[in-house]
């Protein structure tokens, strides 16, 4: 669960048609598999905003208490606010009120370097990429692993962590420092008197919008701007089939993504903070309900259960890719012509009689 809030009750946001994976995949040159990661309580044992509150002397517990009350308070006025992202505007209220005066995107990235990561990180990310390359070599395949972080947290803070260098994409909430005013096209932009702190929400991510980002990775629109995420792309042409994905997150708020991957052949894995009995029970309930394929502690040390499970799942993916390639080769590649040899001479009557005689 992200950012200290209650999980959203919104239905799964899947506006795109989900095509079944191809029965006879193309003979790809390079195969891509992905690990898609949540952040809070997944890659860090707490909440990423902790260094931010500490730097500005803000009571973290009080901030989240206020944030959790906002949706109900606004609802009384007939205004609907998303539980996953209402904290963004409340954070801006703190900036506007002077409690976080001068907060910029650059400062957010600097504070990201102070986020405590889970054990085994960041080393696990590059080690896992090399592990997948080696698995591919054993099957004479070129297979690459890509890491993506998809979070309702702050993208700039994630970019400030040591994990960022090993990520192929980071999706999170963004702030604008210099929103352009009305009629800005009639003015010299460089002469505008613009604020030097965050003032508006630039991008908002909630736990249903996360599914959109998985479609971007699936179709390849994150790598090729000419491919719109809503475009119809044949399964065999999609850059990363869903069955080549593992999604790792911490709980019920990630059920929309868990469901998307399970329905399309991918893997869903839940993690918990080892010290929390409640989170352990929550993960077990997800497994019993068929929401995830497995769960383990958010400890990525080499000997921990979670990296073993992930390595095993990736090995299964690479094995499947090798089998699919072998079947495709057998089905699509014809055998070359062979030299034909003359049939052996037929046996003579005498030879046949002699054989029969001595055979008795």
Image (cartoon, helix red, strand yellow):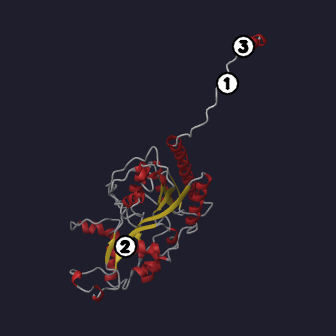
Q: CA–CA distance between discs 3 and 2?
A: 91 Å
Q: Nearer the viewer, mark 1 or mark 2?
A: 1
Earlier in the chain: of badge 1 and badge 2, it is: 2
Secondary structure of the residue carrying tag 1 is loop
29 and 215: which is toward the camera: 29
Question: 6 above or below 201?
Answer: above
Q: How many marks?
A: 3
Q: Position of residue 278 (x, y in %)?
A: 48, 59
**The quarter of the displayed image where residue 68 is located:** bottom left
* Residue underneath mark 3: 352
Name the mark on residue 174: 2
Would residue 147 appear left or right of 230 to someone viewing this image? Answer: right
* Residue underneath mark 1: 344
171 and 253: which is toward the camera: 171
Would residue 65 appear left or right of 269 to someone viewing this image? Answer: left
- Crowding near the residue tagged with mark 2, few <14, some 14–19, many ≥20 C-alpha atoms within 10 Å: many
**The quarter of the displayed image where residue 50 is located:** bottom left
Q: Is residue 3 visible?
A: no
Q: Are marks 1 and 3 in contact (CB under 8 Å)?
A: no
Secondary structure of the residue carrying tag 3 is helix
Q: Is residue 217 visible?
A: yes
The C terminus - image quarter: top right
Earlier in the chain: of badge 3 and badge 2, it is: 2
Q: Position of residue 243 (x, y in %)?
A: 46, 51
């Amino acid at each position: 669960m992200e950012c200290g809030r209650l999980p959203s009750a919104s239905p799964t946001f899947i506006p795109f048609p989900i095509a079944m994976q191809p029965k006879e995949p193309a003979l790809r040159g390079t195969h891509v598999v992905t690990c898609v990661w949540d952040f809070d309580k997944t890659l860090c044992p707490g909440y990423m905003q902790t260094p931010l509150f500490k730097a500005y002397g803000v009571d973290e517990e009080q901030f989240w208490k206020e944030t959790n009350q906002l949706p109900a308070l606004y609802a009384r006025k007939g205004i609907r606010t998303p539980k996953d992202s209402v904290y963004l505007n409340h954070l801006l209220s703190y900036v506007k009120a002077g409690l976080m005066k001068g907060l910029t995107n650059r400062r957010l990235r600097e504070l990201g370097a102070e986020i405590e990561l889970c054990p085994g990180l960041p080393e696990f990310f590059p080690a896992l990429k090399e592990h997948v390359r080696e698995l591919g070599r054993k099957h004479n395949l070129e297979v690459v692993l890509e890491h993506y972080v998809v979070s309702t947290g702050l993208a700039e803070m994630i970019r400030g962590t040591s994990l960022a260098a090993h990520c192929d994409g980071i999706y999170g909430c963004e702030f604008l420092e210099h929103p352009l005013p009305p009629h800005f096209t009639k003015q010299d932009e460089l002469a505008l008197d613009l604020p030097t702190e965050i003032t508006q929400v630039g991008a908002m991510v909630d736990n249903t919008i996360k599914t959109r980002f998985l479609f971007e990775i699936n179709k390849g629109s994150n790598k090729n701007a000419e491919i719109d995420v809503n475009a119809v792309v044949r399964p065999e042409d999609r850059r990363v089939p869903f069955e080549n994905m593992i999604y790792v997150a911490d709980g019920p708020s990630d059920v929309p993504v868990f469901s998307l991957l399970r329905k399309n052949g991918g893997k869903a894995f839940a993690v918990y903070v080892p010290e929390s009995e409640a989170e352990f029970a929550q993960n077990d309930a997800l497994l019993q309900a068929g929401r995830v394929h497995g769960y383990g502690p958010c400890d990525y040390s080499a000997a921990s259960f979670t990296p073993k499970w992930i390595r095993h799942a990736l090995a299964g993916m690479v094995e499947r890719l090798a089998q699919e390639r072998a079947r495709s080769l057998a089905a699509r590649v014809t055998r070359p012509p062979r030299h034909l040899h003359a049939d052996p001479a037929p046996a003579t009557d005498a030879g046949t009689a002699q054989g029969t005689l001595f055979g008795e």
